[in-house]
């Protein structure tokens, strides 16, 4: 596939995406979502989509906001990424987990600590990050050393 720079090919659509991004940022701020959590969501979405450009960008932003390299490096490892002390304190998994409800009231990632406004803003963040990842991947944005 040849490289197509989407922003140059359709600049008005690109501007619309930047407008949506700004609206999502405002929604996150209004909802009181922690700026570090915002960066972590951007990182996770970029990991899932395989967007090296966005992953590098938002990893740097998360580090600048106080995230540690240890937490970033262990973020996708699940239970095995926890320290031995944390694993020792964690309760054992249930032998037979109950089946999920037919229609869950909350997303599986929501432990009840987020308001509906925060959940909505974070969901919009994931949506706009998916779009940015597609733009960066399709446009072959370079990942600088």
Image: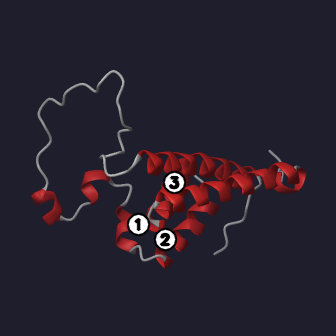
- Asked whether residue 28 appears in the rendered view, the answer is yes
Mark closer to the chain start, 3 or 2:
3
Give residue 72's quadrant in the image. Answer: bottom left
Q: Nearer the viewer, residue 138 or 63?
A: 63
Tell me if label 3 and label 1 are in contact, CB under 8 Å: no
Q: Residue furthest top?
A: 102
Q: Which residue is mark 3?
A: 47
Vertical order, 30 against 130 (above or below):
below
Q: Which residue is mark 1?
A: 72
Q: Mark 2 or mark 1, which is nearer to you?
A: 2
The mark tally for this picture is: 3
Q: Nearer the viewer, residue 37 or 119?
A: 119
Residue that numbered label 2 is attached to:
62
Dot 1 alpha-carbon crowd within 10 angstroms: few under 14, some 14 to 19, many 20 or more? some
Quarter of the figure with the C terminus: bottom right
Q: Residue placed at 54% from the left, 73% from the top?
A: 60
The residue depicted at 36 percent of the width and 37 percent of the height is 106
Place of residue 110 in the rendered image (x, y in percent of width and height, measured from the top left): 35, 45
**Marks 2 and 1, the one that precedes in the sequence:** 2
Describe the colour scheme in one phrase.
Answer: secondary structure
Q: Position of residue 94 (x, y in %)?
A: 13, 37
> What distance separates the C-alpha of mark 3 from that of mark 2?
14 Å
Q: How far across and how far down the image is residue 30, in percent?
A: 52, 59
Does dot 1 land on a helix, a strand or a loop? helix
Toward the front, the furthest residue is 30
| Alpha carbons under labels 2 and 1: distance apart | 9 Å
Does residue 111 appear to the left or right of 118 in the view shown?
left
Look at the numbered disc 2 and give the secondary structure of its residue: helix
């Amino acid at each position: 596939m040849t490289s197509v720079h989407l922003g140059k090919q359709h600049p008005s659509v690109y501007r619309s995406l930047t407008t949506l991004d700004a609206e999502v940022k405002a929604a996150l701020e209004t909802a009181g979502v922690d700026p570090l959590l915002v960066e972590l969501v951007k990182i996770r979405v970029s990991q899932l989509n395989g967007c090296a450009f966005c992953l590098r960008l938002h990893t740097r932003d998360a580090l600048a906001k106080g995230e540690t390299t240890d937490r970033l490096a262990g973020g996708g490892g699940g239970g095995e990424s926890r320290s031995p002390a944390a694993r020792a304190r964690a309760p054992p998994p249930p032998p037979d987990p109950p089946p999920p409800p037919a229609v869950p009231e909350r997303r599986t990632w929501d432990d009840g600590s987020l308001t509906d406004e925060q959940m909505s803003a974070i969901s919009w963040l994931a949506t706009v990050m998916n779009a940015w990842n597609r733009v960066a991947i399709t446009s072959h944005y370079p990942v600088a050393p």
